[in-house]
């Protein structure tokens, strides 16, 4: 993964792309252009008693490895499938018990083991003839060597690996620091967060083929997951399968250009120069104030003296109030990174009213936090209010064909169904289906097992 495009008419196609025709055929929006299994992956430790270490699915009955007692499986079949790699790490996990292994340390351990046991020859294909091996991935060795935070992190991981892998009789050893740094660099700049159906990050994985894909803040493709399998779907019509012109987003797009560029620089060591990041109007729109005139819907730059649409004056008092609520909002959102509190969100939204434009990105972020917090505590009417207000912001900043927008419609449909607003439920579920068919494909379990039963129920209730 080492870095820019527009929308066209929608298509409902969701079939996988034929490799033999991929270089010349027109690719319709919704076409699956890549399916790939991971080179290696690790379930996040916080889910190790809730999800299967092999297939990543939620488990009903805990089936632990009888030796290390560290990993959990959903059934014997998954345990047997995982054994080819787990048998090498098992004594290391047993040695470090009862401590929890940091996710990055376990991922490095698995990468070392994969490379020791033939993984250095494995290829991940992105076309019939185009492929990548692990060594083809960029390591950013020079940048990491001059990055104090990364070096400190790597030093701590080295200590954990040394402790884990110093088992009597084991042929595996921790690579020297130069080699470990190159493996670490490939991990942090090419690793994917594997997401569940609700877009929660449940695992970390390396995929070789898809690492060819560059970043854009205006992506024309999207990566989604089913278990540990990655799918890439086109979200625009493409003239052909040219991977040099296919882009996904590496980061959260619900951020200002300054934040996005900082994230990309910190994590991937490049400066994004896409049209959205270099356009000063993008920052102004994301930080926009509401016009002081309640009858004007324009976004206003409070650095100016008046609204450019209706000439309503911007007073010093208004400017001070805007700066105050922007600071309060940013501080509050920062404190709610792990858990959103509905009362705090409501305070911010009340103070934002009349000061922040409805598409101000900090207002949108607050609505998002309030929506999720309301769901968590079962405040359905509040959730519906915030979710409806959230839709325009998600569409603008995430894009019209983004899984997060589809999932927002799905959640709103569920709530409307629960509230017996069946007509509105059908509307949101239809919108969810329209988007998620493109981003996930018609055969994805999210559509088959969640969306379609809800749609059938909502339509049945309307009759």
Image (cartoon, grey):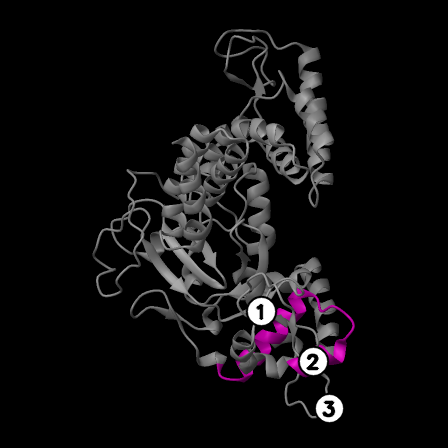
Reading the image, the residue beneath label 2 is 92
Task: Give the side of residue 276 with respect to residue 306, left or right.
Answer: left
Nearer mark to the viewer, of 3 and 1: 1
Tell me which label, 2 or 3, sits earlier in the chain.
2
Which residues are drawn in magenta?
90-118
Reading the image, the residue beneath label 1 is 74
Task: Give the side of residue 4 with respect to residue 265, left or right.
Answer: left
Q: Measured along the vertical axis of the image, is residue 236 above or below residue 66?
A: above
Question: Which mark is drawn over residue 192?
Answer: none
Q: Measured along the vertical axis of the image, is residue 347 above or below residue 173?
A: above
Q: Measured along the vertical axis of the image, is residue 105 above or below residue 33?
A: below
Question: Quadrant where the C terminus lies?
Answer: top left
Q: Secondary structure at mark 2?
A: helix
Q: Is residue 175 visible?
A: no
Q: Secondary structure at mark 1?
A: loop
Taking the magenta stretch, the answer to whether it contains residue 92 is: yes
State the residue at coordinates (71%, 11%): 317
Reading the image, the residue beneath label 3 is 168
Q: Is residue 87 visible?
A: yes
Q: Within the image, what quadrant is residue 364 found in?
A: top right
**For the residue carrying disc 2, how many other residues have a C-alpha within 10 Å: few (<14), some (14-19), or many (20+)?**
many
Tell me which label, 2 or 1, sits earlier in the chain.
1
State the residue at coordinates (55%, 23%): 358
Tell me which label, 3 or 1, sits earlier in the chain.
1
């Amino acid at each position: 993964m080492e870095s820019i495009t527009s929308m066209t008419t929608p298509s409902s196609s969701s079939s996988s792309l034929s490799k033999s025709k991929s270089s010349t055929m027109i690719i319709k929006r919704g076409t699956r252009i890549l399916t790939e299994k991971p080179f290696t992956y690790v379930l996040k430790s916080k889910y190790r008693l809730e999800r299967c270490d092999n297939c990543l699915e939620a488990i009903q009955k805990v089936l632990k490895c009888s030796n290390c007692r560290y990993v959990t499986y959903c059934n014997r079949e998954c345990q047997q499938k995982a054994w080819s790699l787990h048998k090498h790490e098992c004594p290391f996990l047993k040695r470090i018990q009862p401590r929890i292994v940091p996710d990055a340390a376990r991922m490095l351990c698995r990468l070392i083991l994969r490379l020791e046991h033939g993984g250095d020859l494995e290829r991940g294909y992105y076309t019939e003839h185009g492929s990548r091996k692990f060594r083809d991935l960029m390591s950013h060795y020079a940048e990491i060597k001059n990055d104090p935070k990364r070096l400190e992190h790597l030093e701590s991981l080295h200590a954990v690996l040394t402790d884990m892998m110093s088992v009597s009789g084991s042929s595996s050893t921790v690579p020297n620091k130069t080699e470990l740094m190159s493996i670490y660099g490939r991990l942090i700049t090419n690793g994917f967060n594997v997401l569940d159906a609700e877009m929660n990050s449940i695992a970390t994985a390396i995929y070789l083929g898809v690492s060819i894909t560059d970043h854009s803040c205006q992506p024309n493709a999207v990566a989604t997951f089913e278990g540990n399998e990655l799918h890439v779907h086109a979200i625009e019509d493409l003239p052909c399968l040219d991977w040099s012109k296919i882009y996904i987003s590496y980061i959260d797009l619900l951020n200002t250009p300054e934040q996005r560029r900082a994230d990309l620089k910190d994590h991937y060591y490049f400066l994004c120069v896409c049209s959205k990041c270099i356009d000063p109007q993008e920052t102004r729109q994301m930080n926009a104030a509401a016009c002081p005139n309640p009858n004007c819907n324009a976004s206003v730059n409070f650095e100016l003296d008046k609204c450019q649409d209706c000439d309503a004056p911007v007073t010093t008092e208004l400017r001070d109030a805007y700066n105050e609520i922007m600071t309060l909002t940013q501080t509050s959102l920062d404190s709610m990174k792990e858990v959103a509190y509905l009362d705090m969100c409501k305070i911010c939204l009340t103070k934002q009213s009349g000061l922040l434009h409805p598409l101000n990105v900090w207002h949108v972020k607050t609505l998002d936090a309030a929506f999720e917090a309301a769901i968590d505590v079962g405040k359905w009417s509040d959730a519906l209010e915030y979710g409806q207000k959230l839709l325009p912001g998600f569409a603008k900043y995430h894009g019209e064909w983004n899984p997060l927008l589809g999932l927002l419609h799905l959640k709103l449909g569920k709530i409307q169904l629960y509230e017996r607003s069946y007509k509105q439920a059908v509307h949101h579920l239809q919108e969810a289906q329209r988007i998620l068919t493109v981003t996930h494909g018609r055969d994805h379990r999210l559509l088959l097992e969640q969306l379609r039963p809800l749609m059938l129920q909502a339509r049945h209730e309307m009759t």
